[in-house]
Amino acid sequence: MVSLPNLPHPLPGAVGLSHLSAYEWEAADGACGGSPHLHLVCTEAYVVTGGRGAVQTLSPDGYRDTPLEPGSVAWFTPGTVHRMVQGGGLRITVLMQNSGLPEAGDAVFTFPPDVLADPERYAAAASLPARTGPEAATAARKRRDLAVEGYLPLREALMAGDNGPYVEFQQAAARLVRDRVPAWRELWRAGALATAERTGAQLTALEAGDPGYLADARSYDTGPTRHGGYGMCGRREEYELPGTTLPYHGE
């Protein structure tokens, strides 16, 4: 029998899963919604399950405002700044590449440059003092407002054809997370990479005429392990899966 690695059993492709109800707090520009941010190594997808809204994105292609309605799917590759905007009852299911990495700090808020330049100030601004309750709500809104404060000049410059501030933000985000990369690599190896390698081992077994690994077939189920948390974009229902997904860093 071909030997297969003894691995945890994450969701297909070792993706992260959560449900979000977009924030309804009004920001400085009059829009209601979440905290603009980017991911350094993870692609994120929104699957809209209810309500209406939009996602605003900043990328080398410029600024986009993509409408969201039930059935819409939108996704953003690493480096894309994205901001969920509430239009009324917006609710989405989030699929996140490399489960565990966003929770370990892969996501960076668009705070103003002076905050990004100081790791201690950034950490203080990004963290929440509690997981739920009024204190958490106040801190989450303050965090969102600070991210919007830094986001609006990036958007304005990009719309004017100047991508300099956007590139500088990407570079600042990369500097902030550089020391975390070794830990991220271990999470990736245990999750997404190990899942892909398991498929390779299964293909090798089938090619050798040995389907013995099918004797380990199992079904799994779970439910939300946290309701009403304060995520980057909205109130969050989380699924913590052993070996991959961790509680959000700083929340």
Image (cartoon, rainbow, N blue to C red):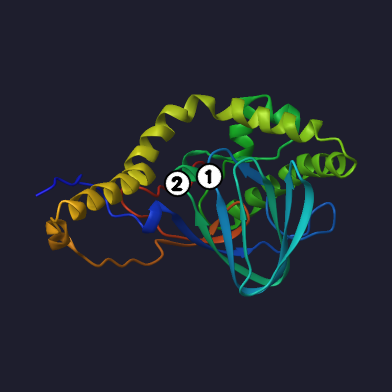
Quadrant in the rendering for residue 100? top left
Amino acid under label 1?
A: Cys
At horizontal 14% and vertical 56% (from top left) the residue drawn is 209
Front residue of 237/129: it is 237
Q: Which residue is mark 1?
A: 42
At horizontal 21% and vertical 65% (from top left) the residue drawn is 218
State the CA–CA distance, disc 2 to disc 1: 6 Å
Q: Residue furthest right?
A: 160
Q: Which residue is mark 2?
A: 98
Residue 147 located left or right of residue 173: right
Where is residue 129 drawn, in percent x and y? Answer: 55, 44
Q: Secondary structure at mark 2?
A: loop
82 in relation to 72, above or below: above
Where is residue 19 drawn, in percent x and y? Answer: 52, 64
Residue 139 located left or right of residue 63: left
Front residue of 77/53: it is 77
Front residue of 28/6: it is 6
Q: Secondary structure at mark 1?
A: loop
Asked if the residue under mark 1 is in contact with the one under mark 2, i.e. CB atoms within 8 Å, the reply is: yes
Where is residue 213 drawn, in percent x and y? Answer: 15, 56
Where is residue 245 drawn, in percent x and y? Answer: 40, 50
At horizontal 58% and vertical 33% (from top left) the residue drawn is 123
Residue 247 badge: none
